Image (cartoon, rainbow, N blue to C red):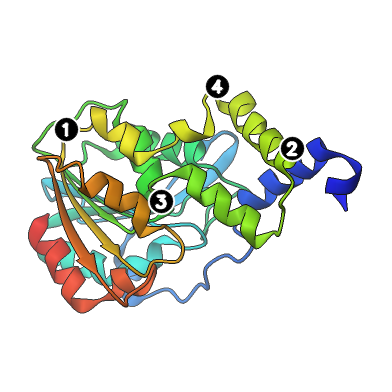
Amino acid sequence: MLTLVNKRKAAEKAFELFCTPFMKAEVRVPAIFSKAEQLHFQLNGMKVHGFRWKKENARTVLILHGFRSAAHKFHQYITSFVDKGYQVLAFDAPAHGSSEGKTVNAVQYAEMITKVIALYGPVDSFLAHSFGGIALSLALENLPHSENNRIVLIAPATETCSAVDGAFKMLQIKDEEVRRQFDNIIFEQSGQQTSWFSINRALKKIEAKILWIHDEDDDVTPWADALKVKEQGLANIEFIVTKGLGHRKIYGDFHIRNKVIDFL
């Protein structure tokens, strides 16, 4: 209806929907979270909630969840990292889990990552799923790091243009002017074109060793986008390609978890 009346208003509403995780992850807190130190800080006027295990351990890993998810979804990784002698950090992104907010975008998630590192770092290793992957790439290209850092990207949101395409398809918006206005909103808020929000672009400034895990049947973050990265044959990236695990089962798979632990 808005598309028929006002293209700009329709684009504004579409952008709001695009940034809104309507269903917060169910809070079924695993036992390991009762052993965590509770962490909080303010980000853009909102309280961000996080957890820390084994503060005394020298090596630190930061876990970054995806859209409509939360830190507690990665409890099995947390247990494994603690057992391996890591200090573990895990935070609920704005508008997710126990953190405040109703909407979030990749820039805000990247700002959260930057502040986590400033407050609780340094961080040696990162595990990021989906939306967490694009946010991490945006943060890391502007932060000091080296080839000694290690990153695991599981089904990362490689290209924001593809994410917007998927949102417009889901919302059944076919109006080209609404899409143009949507891209204008992104530029007005960030000073960058939609295509700039790309892991492929950010990789040019990332020196860390990367394990990239993606499923060919992923219906959320297209394998076609990841394949373009794989075909470049970048020396610091190792790929594991699966089939049949999709977008969410992949990080819960026992064999994938073991490969992640071994890599880090």
Task: Identify residue for label 3.
Answer: 157
Dot 4 or dot 1, earlier in sequence = 4
Dot 3 or dot 2, earlier in sequence = 3
Image height of 40 relative to 177, above or below = below
Task: Identify residue for label 4.
Answer: 191
The residue closer to the viewer here, 184 or 73, is 184
Residue at left offset 61%, top offset 27%: 189
Q: Secondary structure at mark 4?
A: loop
**Real-space Cα separation, disc 3 to disc 2, in angstroms:** 25 Å
Task: Identify residue for label 2.
Answer: 177
**In which quadrant will I find the C terminus?**
bottom left
Tag 1: Cα neighbours inside 10 Å, few (<14), some, or many (≥20)? some
Task: Identify residue for label 1.
Answer: 207
Which three-letter amino acid code belongs to the residue tagged 4?
Gly
Q: Secondary structure at mark 3?
A: loop
**Real-space Cα separation, disc 2 to disc 4, in angstroms:** 20 Å
Residue at left offset 62%, top offset 34%: 183
Image height of 218 relative to 148, above or below = below
Q: Is residue 41 visible?
A: no
Which three-letter amino acid code belongs to the residue tagged 3?
Ala
Q: Closer to the observer: label 2 or label 4?
A: 2
Residue at left offset 50%, top offset 72%: 27
Q: What label does residue 248 carry, if any?
A: none
Tag 2: Cα neighbours inside 10 Å, few (<14), some, or many (≥20)? some
Q: Position of residue 84 (x, y in %)?
A: 9, 63
Q: Position of residue 230 (x, y in %)?
A: 21, 49
Dot 1 or dot 2, earlier in sequence = 2
Q: Secondary structure at mark 2?
A: helix
Dot 1 or dot 3, earlier in sequence = 3
Dot 3 or dot 4, earlier in sequence = 3
